[in-house]
Amino acid sequence: MKNSINEKILAKGTIRNATKLPVITIGLGKVKDLKPLDRIIWKDEDGNVLISTKENPEGILYDQDSTAVVRVIGGKVKMNGMYDLYVPAARKIEKLLGNPIVLSDQLDEAQLAELAPILGAASEVRPSLAPAEPGRKVVVVTKEMLEGAEYILCHCSYEPDPEATVRLYEGDIFLVEDTSTAAGYRIGKDEFAETHELL
């Protein structure tokens, strides 16, 4: 089924090629097994674990049997004061975590100390160097695409609620997963600059 909001982004923007750079990705175990961590991981009144992400700091309810990960991007343990914590699609987990590394070989003591609280909340710690991903298709949101507005909306494939919308501001990226259905998701401009090379 086509997504009309996202189709407008594809129609107004220019699809470009990009390569995702290798990123340290750490598997933390299943969402339901994560331990509470102040304003980052907590349980709701039904006992479900909620996770605060950069995109949803108020907390998001993921599938409780999915695997949570945290990324270290460009040597940064936190971006804007927050861990880059999220739950990737199940089909991506083995690819993201398939290249085991020793964290102490990759990070210094200060970085490891900054990671310690989130790793302490994990039921397992599976560090990996996620491989480069060439051939990604992206649309860079331009001032012209905004047509005088502050932002445009998109539907993100990572949102559990398919009707939820996410704001795209000038410089943000819409990563195109499927041009035939206009499926994709938002990547903030700062994160994109750290994790991708635009071709």
Image (cartoon, helix red, strand yellow):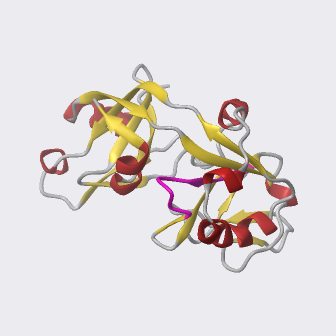
Residue 130, position in %: x, y?
60, 37
Q: Quadrant of residue 181?
A: top left
Pick the front one: 80 or 181: 80
Residue 23, position in %: x, y?
55, 44
Q: Would you say residue 3 is visible in this rendering? A: no
Q: Residue furthest top?
A: 180
Pick the front one: 195 or 145: 195
Q: Residue furthest bottom?
A: 38
Q: On screen, 41 above or below 2?
A: below
Residue at position x 67%, y 51% in the image: 105
Residue 172, position in %: x, y?
31, 50
Residue at position x 43%, y 45% in the image: 195
Residue at position x 52%, y 47% in the image: 163
Q: On screen, 102 above or below 118?
A: above
Residue at position x 71%, y 38% in the image: 97
Total marks placed: 0
Residue 81, position in %: x, y?
50, 74
Give the magenta part as a residue range: 68-77
Q: Is residue 144 magenta?
A: no
Q: Would you say residue 30 is visible in this rendering? A: yes
- Specify whether 110 is left or right of 127: left
Q: Quadrant of residue 58?
A: bottom right
Q: On screen, 164 above or below 100?
A: below
- Specify whether 173 is left or right of 85: left
Q: Is residue 70 magenta?
A: yes
Pick the front one: 172 or 167: 172
Q: Quadrant of the C terminus?
A: top left
